[in-house]
Image (cartoon, rainbow, N blue to C red):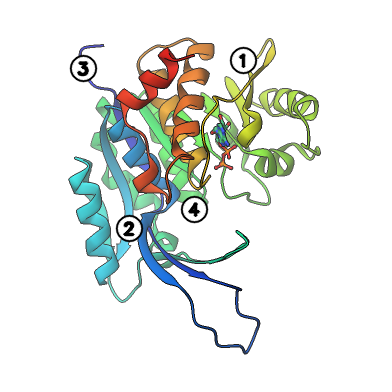
Amino acid sequence: MSQPARIIVVGSINMDLVFRTHQLPRPGETITGHSFQQVPGGKGANQAVAAARLGAQVSMVGRIGDDGFGRTLIDGLTEESIDTSFVKVTPNCSSGLAVIGVEDSGQNSITVIPGANGFVTPDDVIAAEELFQSADVLLVQFEIPLPAVQKAVELAHRYGVKIILDPAPSVRVVPADLLQVDVICPNETEAESLSGQVVDSIAMAMSAVQQIGSRGPQVSLITLGSQGVVVFDGKTSVHIPPFNVDAIDTTAAGDAFAAAFGIALAEQMSVSEATRFAAAAGALATTKHGAQPAMPTRDAVEALLRGR
Ligand code: ADP
């Protein structure tokens, strides 16, 4: 493919504030932790960074607050060559934050403050309409208000832009218009909420993915972490086993997966090629700590695919 894939991401931009401690504090308790790290995250921004590292030309639509985190987040996206002209600064508001406590045991506890992400509106998406006129693929998730996601999906349909919906985190009811997409890629928990079926085995996932696929998406996947992924193309469902990697942190594996599937679609790969490409990206994301720092490069994904 001579031209890079053109990708729009309409979604969240967060700073992850990660502290490590022997044990998480109980209510009312004060403890001393071992370390603190500030890591850029947010499903939208993670997918934007993953798409950029995989070789796409990426534009991000979203919001940050008028704080130092917001400036750092924009600088990080710009360093990845992501166009942030349609990321708005929301006055008197914090940027999206995730405060993540991790115990030595590996157990964690997470508080998400949506901040500016909670103020993304359909008008913000309309302001970015020109992007849709030339884009190949739209990536959307559920960390911003649904009306903004619905407007992005509507514009994508209008301009023939392919849509990848990562329905995360789970919402109580997914509006029917959001199921009319090219690709949907929930994980097990989100697939349970979407299908109303328990998804605790590959066999159950094969059944749930067909149920989800019967409601509108052209291609439906359920990502199963270290168990790989199941994919349904409207006719048959197939299980693709995981790539064998040394996983150390599964944060944002699903984001790498969704972004990679989007690029594969823009590059006209078949569904099975796209699923392998995305599974390789997801697997590599687990081999490094954090969200955006762990997003793999194109070379790394191709090397893993060749090695198989
Ligand atoms: P999410 O982060 O949304 O929960 P998953 O954990 O299911 O998503 O990961 C997305 C994809 O990344 C999986 O379908 C799989 O292909 C790959 N992946 C995730 N964890 C591993 C792992 N431990 N080993 C190999 N591949 C993995």
C-alpha separation, residue under disc 1 versus residue under disc 3 = 27 Å
- Identified by mark 1, the residue type is Asp
Element under label 4?
Answer: loop
Q: In front: 148, or 81?
A: 81
Residue that label 2 marks: 63
The answer to whether 96 appears left or right of 86 in the picture is right
- Identified by mark 3, the residue type is Gln
- Identified by mark 2, the residue type is Arg
Would you say the residues marked 4 and 3 are in contact, meaning their CB atoms lie under 8 Å apart? Answer: no
**Image position, residue 162 (x, y; %):** 42, 24
Residue that label 4 marks: 143
Element under label 1?
Answer: loop
Residue that label 1 marks: 233
Kindly indicate the quadrant of the structure image that contains residue 25: bottom right
Sequence-first tag of 2 and 3: 3
The answer to whether 46 appears left or right of 31 in the picture is left
Q: Considering only vertical position in the picture, is 31 above or below 134?
A: below
Residue depicted at x 70% and y 26%: 209
**Image position, residue 6 (x, y; %):** 28, 27
Closer mark to the observer between disc 2 and disc 3: 3
**Image position, residue 237 (x, y; %):** 69, 15
Residue that label 3 marks: 3
The answer to whether 82 appears left or right of 306 in the picture is left
